Image (cartoon, rainbow, N blue to C red):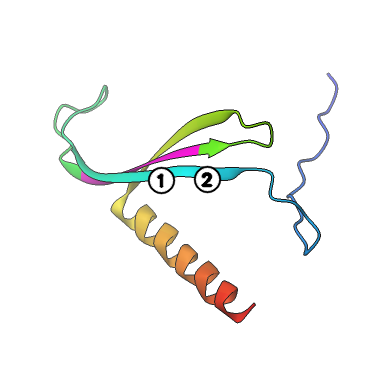
């Protein structure tokens, strides 16, 4: 069995081009009431729907569901990004 090459994080610098463009960002707050494994969940979640265009213009949709604590962490990280961007 062949090993796959290690994954590398993309590196962006001042000369790098942005390879994708955010076209649309939508969110909603929902309440999960049941699932395959549990008849009564009743927990809130945040659903995020993104539309992203790649370098060729192809638009792809992505969706993410997060628990409230996961969303709060996501939000804190974006606040940190915004604070760094303001210093540039």
Which part of the image, by quadrant, shows the N terminus?
top right
Residue pointed to by mark 1: 25
Above or below, 6 against 39 in this view is below
* Residue 7 in view here: yes
Asked whether residue 45 is drawn in magenta, I would say: yes
* Residue 46 in view here: no
Q: Quadrant of residue 12?
A: bottom right
Most distant residue in the front direction = 57
Query: Which dot marks residue 12?
Result: none
Does 34 sit left or right of 24 as displayed? left
Q: Residue at x 60, y 28 (%)?
A: 58
Does 58 sit left or right of 10 as displayed? left
Q: Residue at x 63, y 43 (%)?
A: 20
Which part of the image, by quadrant, shows the C terminus?
bottom right
Does 51 sit left or right of 9 as displayed? left
Q: Tell me residue 43's x, y (percent).
A: 20, 44
Main SS class of the magenta portion in the image:
strand
Q: Tell me residue 55's x, y (percent).
A: 68, 37
Q: Residue at x 83, y 28 (%)?
A: 3
Q: Which residues are magenta?
A: 44-51
Residue pointed to by mark 2: 22
Q: Are marks 2 and 1 in contact (CB under 8 Å)?
A: yes
């Amino acid at each position: 069995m062949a090993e796959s090459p290690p994954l590398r994080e993309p590196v962006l610098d001042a000369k790098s081009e942005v390879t994708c463009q955010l076209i649309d960002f939508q969110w909603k707050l929902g309440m999960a009431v049941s699932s395959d494994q549990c008849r009564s969940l009743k927990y809130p979640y945040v659903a995020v729907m993104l539309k992203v265009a790649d370098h060729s213009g192809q638009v792809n949709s992505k969706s993410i569901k997060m628990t409230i604590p996961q969303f709060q962490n996501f939000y804190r990280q974006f606040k940190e990004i915004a604070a760094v961007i303001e210093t540039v």
